[in-house]
Amino acid sequence: MWTYALRRLIISVPLLIAISFMTFGVLQLAPGNYFDQLKLNPQISKDVIERYEKQYHLDQPWVVQYVHWLKGIVTLDWGHSFDNDEPVLKVIQSRVWNTLLLSLCSIFFTWLFAIPIGIYCAVKQYKWGDKIFSVLSYIGLSTPNFFFALLLLYILGSYLDILPIGGMYSGNFRSLGLLGKIFDVVKHLIIPVFVISTASMAFLQRVMRGNMLEVLRSQYLMTARAKGLPENRVIYRHALRNAINPMITIFGYQLSGILSGAALTEIICSWPGIGSLMLEAVRSKDIYLVMANMLIAGVLLVLGNLIADILLATIDPRIRYG
């Protein structure tokens, strides 16, 4: 298993290089660079702009720029964020923990409720509980996240005034004690976590229900029932173990999108995460900041799929990696 994991990690290096090369090339399709907008400012001389362009190799062909960026990545120099006037790593570090907190909370609550609900709906197929959850899942799948976020912000934040209408902290956050700070962050988390979890929960619940229904109709489970095994043992020990396999793959993809999956909700809820930061970086052509986010997303994609494969081999004894 560890040999397989190491081989996958080694193979992922040229894959990440290819992805970064293609991304860098696509970003160059937009004309100009960050410093072009500064040329419209009469207070900044042309010589200063040309000096900065030469310093960051922006006056050279984009392939040469990419080679310089790749050399910097190898030496742990991820470049400079022009818009924030700080090193890229420092800018990302100031936001990445906020996004991780939001995404991990969303993933936790999504899986905590989606799997049991999917199992319940499969066991109680066409009963009232199954019908109610089916309707709720269709509503969750069809409601855009941005609309749902705006609706909750208006109802719970503005109209009822029981939750904050955005941000991560209150104005008096620094004056609060430890428990007060935790409670304040939790209050700000409720709406964005609920919005992100709703659509994912609706999707996963439907997938889990379909997997369980397919497994529950299989012949080996009918044989198990005929031998007199308790229904709970048939469902939770035999059926669930086979129905959960496709969910593990989905879990791996969710891990890969842990920094980018909440971007729109972060922007709507004014959550200071990676999403809003990347939007501004793309708009201002802050190329090294965009490339850093792409590289992190690529690494998470590789790790997410690798973790999913390892979990599948752990859960299903039929799967073996050479």
Image (tube, rainbow, N blue to C red):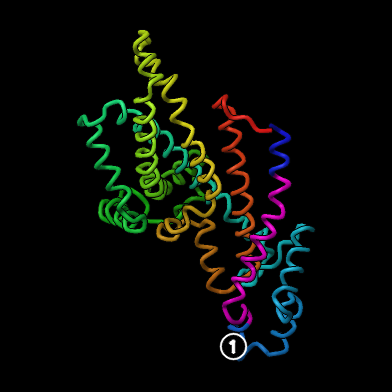
Q: Is residue 50 left or right of residue 167?
A: right
Q: Can residue 52 be seen in this view?
A: no
Question: The residue tagged with tag 1: helix, strand or loop?
Answer: loop
Picture layout, residue 28 above or below residue 263: below
Q: Is residue 80 left or right of residue 127?
A: right
Residue for point 58% across, 43% down? 305
Where are the magenta residues, as a range? 9-35
Q: Nearer the viewer, residue 221 or 137?
A: 221
Q: Residue 79 in the image: x percent, y percent?
A: 71, 66
Does residue 20 belong to the magenta stretch? Answer: yes
Q: Residue 278 in the image: x percent, y percent?
A: 54, 63
Q: Nearer the viewer, residue 205 or 291?
A: 205
Q: Can residue 317 be seen in this view?
A: yes
Q: Residue 313 in the image: x percent, y percent?
A: 59, 30
Q: In which quarter of the image is residue 319?
A: top right
Residue for point 47% across, 57% down? 263
Q: Is residue 133 left or right of residue 71?
A: left
Q: Nearer the viewer, residue 50 or 215?
A: 215
Quadrant location of the C terminus in the rendered image: top right
Picture layout, residue 283 above or below residue 123: below
Quadrant location of the N terminus in the rendered image: top right
Q: In which quarter of the image is residue 28?
A: bottom right
Q: In this view, does 213 lie to the left or right of 245?
A: left
Residue for point 52% across, 55% down? 260
**Which residue position holds label 1?**
41
Name which residue type carries label 1.
Asn
Does residue 317 belong to the magenta stretch? Answer: no
Q: Residue 196 in the image: x percent, y percent?
A: 41, 48
Q: Label 1: few (<14), some or many (≥20) within 10 Å?
A: few
